[in-house]
Amino acid sequence: MAMFIRVDIDPAIQQDTALVKRLAEVCPVDIFKVTDGNIETVESNLDECTLCDLCTQAAPGKVNVVKLYR
Ligand code: SF4
């Protein structure tokens, strides 16, 4: 179970093949993976997130990295 962040993905993204592919490529720590054309997060990699914002820049308003700590 990830302790530091949660990544919320707008389900509408699944319709956008190019965006799904870009998201999977952009994350430096492989938090996104594509399974059967759908993007999902890799639970075991979530805590590796560097908060680099590349994913939120790739999909503005559609991907949200939520910090679970303060
Ligand atoms: S903020 Fe960076 S490291 Fe974190 S999920 Fe997005 S692309 Fe990956």
Image (cartoon, rainbow, N blue to C red):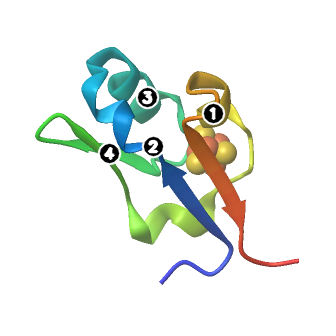
| Residue occupying image coordinates x 27% and y 20% | 17
Q: Which of pointers 2 and 3 indicates the residue nearer the eye?
A: 2
Q: Secondary structure at mark 3?
A: helix
Q: Quadrant of ligand 1?
A: top right
Q: Which residue is mark 4?
A: 33
List x then y, in percent, for residue 37: 17, 34
List x then y, in percent, for residue 33: 32, 45
Report how far apart the C-alphas of labels 1 and 3 lie in the structure: 18 Å
Task: Answer with mark 1 or mark 3, whichever residue precedes in sequence.
Answer: 3
Work out whether residue 37 or residue 25 is closer to the camera in this orientation and state it.
37
Q: Which residue is mark 2?
A: 10
Q: Amino acid at mark 4?
A: Lys
Q: Which residue is mark 1?
A: 61
Q: Which residue is mark 3?
A: 25
Q: Secondary structure at mark 4?
A: strand
Report how far apart the C-alphas of labels 2 and 1 lie in the structure: 8 Å
Residue 52 sits in quarter = top right
Asked whether the residues under the numbered discs 2 and 3 touch, taking CB atoms below 8 Å apart as contact, a structural biologist would say no
Q: Does residue 8 sit above or below 54 in this rendering?
A: below
Task: Answer with mark 4 or mark 3, whichever residue precedes in sequence.
Answer: 3
Q: Which of pointers 4 and 2 indicates the residue nearer the eye?
A: 2
Q: Amino acid at mark 1?
A: Gly
